[in-house]
Amino acid sequence: MDIVNIKKLAKELNISTSTISRAFNGSPDINKDTKERILAFAKEHNFLPNHYASNLRDKKTKTIAVIVPEIANDFFSQAINGIEEVARKKGFYILLYRTDDVFEKEVSFVNYLNNGKVDGIIMSVSGEANDHNYLRQLESKNVPVVFFDRVYEDIDAAKVTTNDYDSSFAATEHLLQTGCRRVAYLVVNKSISIGQVRMQGYMDALKKHDVAFDDELVIDCSNDEKVNYKILTKVLQEIKPDGIFSSVERLAFATYYVCNDLGISIPGDLKMISFSSLGIAPLLSPALSTITQPAYEMGIKAATLLFEALEQKTSNLKRHIVLKSKLFIRKSSGGEK
């Protein structure tokens, strides 16, 4: 046969096109022998139905996009696993896009996806710039968006976050209660909502314990490992904090490297706690104290919200789910002997 499609299959087998479709879609209301005959014939002639084409009538791609800043981070890996589980149960595929925290990439991905290439988008934002009209265009195309972890407050969309303020307050307070008075706050992008909320928790904990806020101890870091190594080396040699609260997992690891090279003892000279979902945090030397977000559950909730929007045929669900993180005190902050 030449190019084989459902109509040609129906003609060759003398079966209706609707029966062919039911065979490919796994419908139970079709004779088993008929189904096997259709699938065997299709396989023999190298015919694989296109799941996009089969959904053209209702303009569904059965695909969702997931846009994240990074994949290596254990938090995002767990969240993606949660999203994928829900999508798979719904019979959907996921397309994964990594921005590397580059705003231009985020804009490019969203613009590429807003022409019916996916049914919905789940994203954790890069956090740059104030013009988010590229996201508002999705609403006119009826493409729902759900934010998780890192969000844009000016975009009215469904969101899944954690209690970042409470967690940051508790983490900072813990360091202060162990005797720290010069607690440095490490951040990559304090302009995004999550950076602002976490910093506010840090500042309010200092205020509660009558420790003056020092802008010199708010350390703007980078996405580049080598740059961070230089920044943190200078901080530890010149500013000399006695505590580190890292708002990003990779900055905690960078601090470990610098401390090792400079001969700075953790927790003897410097106590540390960090946001991290890394499963091996207790196995580090010393074991890392962490604020651990329920990453997998966040992925589940974000995907559930997206499919709720798809089922309701709305691009704006206007729901905000806040989950609780857990504080694990280990040796890096003086919590274990």
Image (tube, rainbow, N blue to C red):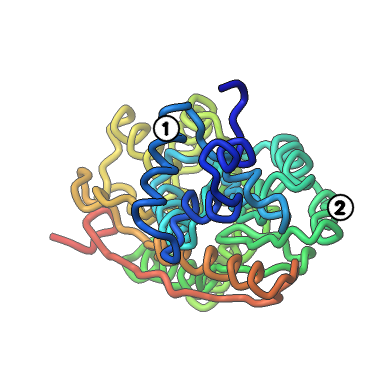
**Inter-mark Cα distance, 1 to 2:** 46 Å
User: Picture coordinates of residue 25 (x, y %)?
Assistant: 49, 54
Q: Mark 1 falls on what kind of element?
A: helix
Q: Is residue 219 visible?
A: no
**Quarter holding the C terminus?**
bottom left
Q: Is 279 on the left-hand or right-hand side of 98?
A: left
Within 10 angstroms of label 2, few (less than 14), some, or many (20 or more) residues? few
Q: Mark 2 falls on what kind of element?
A: helix
Within 10 angstroms of label 1, few (less than 14), some, or many (20 or more) residues? few
- Closer to the camera in the image, 329 or 326: 326
Q: Residue furthest left?
A: 337
Residue at image point 52% right, 48% down: 93
The numbered mark at residue 133 is 2
Q: Is residue 143 visible?
A: yes
Please, what is the three-letter code of the amino acid marked with disc 1?
Lys
- Closer to the camera in the image, 311 or 335: 311
Count of numbered tags? 2
Q: Is 168 on the left-hand or right-hand side of 108?
A: left
**Quarter holding the N terminus?**
top right
Question: Residue 153, located in which quarter of the rendered image?
Answer: bottom right
Residue at image point 50% right, 69% down: 301
Question: Residue 151, located in which quarter of the rendered image?
Answer: bottom right
Please, what is the three-letter code of the amino acid marked with disc 2?
Asn
Q: Nearer the viewer, mark 1 or mark 2?
A: 1
The numbered mark at residue 114 is none
User: Picture coordinates of residue 230 (x, y %)?
Assistant: 50, 27
Q: Earlier in the sequence, mark 1 or mark 2?
A: 1
Q: Residue furthest front?
A: 14
User: Picture coordinates of residue 188 (x, y %)?
Assistant: 58, 45
The numbered mark at residue 43 is 1
Q: Is 32 on the left-hand or right-hand side of 301?
A: left
User: Picture coordinates of residue 36 (x, y %)?
Assistant: 36, 46
